[in-house]
């Protein structure tokens, strides 16, 4: 058994003022109640909320305050993320702080939530770090997990537990929960997805184990989630398969093909290129969108059959009664 204790803190995050003191208070209370916790993870952009005007230089005063907190309590700390200014660029960055108060890594979010998280530069480096005598951990942020290649790469670098601060306050939180669960399952790892509440989140943080079982799903209020994990379970699942069944990482390793979609030089992107620019919708901008000509066939009765069902004269899909939301604000 390789036990290690991690606590996610789902707390109220304000956009009106800094949250650093409140985060420190939550950390003090956590350690007083659960002194066995060895690592703490807060939600994305917890220190200041999603306000680039609060961007700080690398190693700025906010990061230094968190280093002091980690050293005072002698634990690993991921204080969510904060906007980091490097020259004219701003990144969404998670510092990884060890129990001595030293920053051992900084992860810059690779997939800003475009087209809504404009002006934030994407990072290009993956982040894994080792906890001595325990195991290897990987870091990703919010929208990154919608691109499974990010988690797969971290796991291919040896990560056994993914630490994933997020900030979702929109109607797709119910979609993110199965993404988190699937990420843990297909990569046979622990997955800590920590959301905020209040101005910057609807809660429902989720912790999933390497067998795909949900260890804990939070509600919609403030919540402290201390959990002891066992990284030997990860190693066993990867050896014999998830629940003794599929050995997905070995199958991925031994794959007979290289996926053409990842080889841009092959020019296999015609359909993706046809989707148009990545821009924010405006009122009315989703109407009168023609179907790709090669996918249209006659369906009779004045309708055409498109890729997602029967489309009537007004361009409305009759196969589904769901309305597509126009706005989507999480990052």
Image (cartoon, helix red, strand yellow):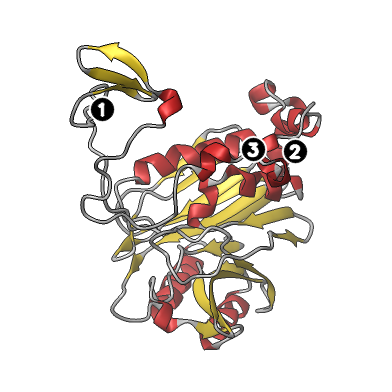
Q: Residues within 10 Å of mark 1 (few under 14, many from 20)?
A: some
Mark 2 lies on residue: 235
Q: Nearer the viewer, residue 310 or 159?
A: 310
Q: Is residue 323 left or right of residue 162?
A: left
45 sits to left or right of 308: right
Q: What residue sits right under mark 1 in the picture?
A: 317
Spot occupied by residue 168 in the image (x, y as percentages of width and height): 37, 55
| Residue 253 seen by the camera | yes
The mark lying in front, picked from 3 and 2, is: 3
- What residue sits 32% from the left and 81% below the top? 17
Which residue is identified by label 3?
268
Label 3, label 2: how many angstroms apart (C-alpha)?
37 Å
Q: Position of residue 230 (x, y in %)?
A: 66, 44
Instruction: Give the mark nearer the N terminus: 1 vs 3.
Output: 3
Q: How far is disc 1 from disc 3 in space, using C-alphas?
A: 29 Å
Q: Is residue 226 visible?
A: no
User: Could you tell which of marks 1 and 2 lies nearer the N-terminus?
Assistant: 2
Quarter of the rendering containing residue 202: bottom left
* Residue toward you, 71 or 320: 320
Q: Is residue 278 above or below residue 181?
A: below
Q: Residue furthest top?
A: 300
Q: Which residue is depicted at the point 36% across and 25% down?
A: 308
Q: Residue 206: where, in percent of width, then height? A: 45, 46
- Where residue 292 appears, as percent x and y from the top left, is 41, 32
| Disc number placed over residue 24 in the picture, else none | none
């Amino acid at each position: 058994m390789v036990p290690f204790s991690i606590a996610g803190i789902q707390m109220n995050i304000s956009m009106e003022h800094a949250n650093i003191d409140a985060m420190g208070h939550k950390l003090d209370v956590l350690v007083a109640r659960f002194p066995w916790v060895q690592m703490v993870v807060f939600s994305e952009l917890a220190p200041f909320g999603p306000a680039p005007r609060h961007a700080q230089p690398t190693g700025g005063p906010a990061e230094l305050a968190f280093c002091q907190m980690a050293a005072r309590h002698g634990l690993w700390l991921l204080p969510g993320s904060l906007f980091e200014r490097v020259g004219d660029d701003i990144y969404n960055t998670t510092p990884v702080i060890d129990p001595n108060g030293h920053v051992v890594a900084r992860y810059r979010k690779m997939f800003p939530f475009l087209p809504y998280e404009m002006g934030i530069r994407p990072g290009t480096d993956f982040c894994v770090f080792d906890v001595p005598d325990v195991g290897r951990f990987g870091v990703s942020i919010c929208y990154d997990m919608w691109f499974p290649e990010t988690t797969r790469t971290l796991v291919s670098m040896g990560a056994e537990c993914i630490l994933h601060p997020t900030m979702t306050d929109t109607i797709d939180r119910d979609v993110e929960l199965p993404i988190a669960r699937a990420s843990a399952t297909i990569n046979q790892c622990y997955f800590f997805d920590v959301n905020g509440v209040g101005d910057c989140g609807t809660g429902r943080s989720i912790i999933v184990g390497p067998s795909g079982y949900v260890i804990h799903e939070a509600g919609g209020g403030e919540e402290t989630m201390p959990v002891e994990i066992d990284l030997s379970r990860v190693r066993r699942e990867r050896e014999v398969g998830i629940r003794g069944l599929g050995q997905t990482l070995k199958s991925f390793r031994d794959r007979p093909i290289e996926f053409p979609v990842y080889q841009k030089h092959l020019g296999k992107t015609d359909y993706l290129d046809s989707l148009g620019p990545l821009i924010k919708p405006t009122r009315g901008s989703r109407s009168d969108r023609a179907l790709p000509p090669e996918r249209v066939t006659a369906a009779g009765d004045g309708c055409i059959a498109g890729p997602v069902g029967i489309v009537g004269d007004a361009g409305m899909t009759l196969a589904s009664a769901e309305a597509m939301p126009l706005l989507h604000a999480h990052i």
